[in-house]
Image (cartoon, grey):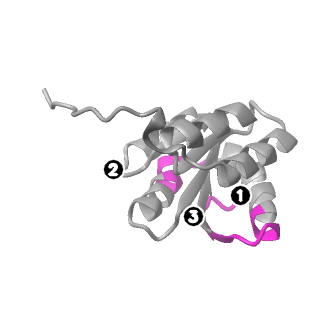
Amino acid sequence: MRIAIASDHAGFAYKTLIIAELERLGHVVKDFGTDSDVAVDYPVYIRPAAEAVARGECERAIVLGGSGNGENMVANRVKGVRCAYCFSVQTAMLGRQHNDANCIAIGQRLVDGDTALAIVRTFLDTQFEGGRHVRRIQLIDT
């Protein structure tokens, strides 16, 4: 699978850890930065990773920050991206099963490294359950 990954400075250490795991598992990783723990504005890195999923260049994306909240918000602003905010294996599993998430956001300050890797593996291994839990509704712009 081709996977986009991006972080701000507060998620950089986990980005490095996750890239190594993704490559070990045989995935192709496209790294959108940042390249250090020097303070940066996260949207500069997160949005291009999300856009790569929206364009079909990557099948999934993983975005990282201190809490993961801002990264989640930026990714979800991109049409076609369904980013799940994950802080446990269960949130990753449910994001895939019930919401067909194609992106996850993880906060480096909120979960330990082993949990972050377990979240990533769950995100990659869990299948969407189809329309069983999702009712299609039409949203009306007001």
Q: Is residue 140 magenta?
A: no
- Judge left or right: residue 101 versus residue 16: left
Q: Is residue 57 above or below residue 70?
A: below
Residue designated by label 2:
79
Q: Is residue 30 magenta?
A: yes
**Which residue is drawn at the image coordinates 37% and 49% (left, top)?**
78
**For residue 26, what is the image quadrant?**
bottom right
Badge 2: residue crowd in 10 Å (few <14, some 14–19, many ≥20): few
Q: Amino acid at mark 1?
A: Ser
Q: CA distance from mark 2 to mark 1?
A: 28 Å
Q: Position of residue 34 (x, y in %)?
A: 62, 58
**For residue 106, what is the image quadrant?**
top right
Residue designated by label 3:
32
Q: CA distance from mark 2 to mark 3?
A: 19 Å
Q: Which numbered tag is attached to residue 36? A: 1
Badge 1: residue crowd in 10 Å (few <14, some 14–19, many ≥20): some
Quadrant, the N terminus: bottom right
Which residues make up the magenta segment? 22-46
Q: Is residue 25 above or below residue 43?
A: below
Q: Which numbered tag is attached to residue 68? A: none
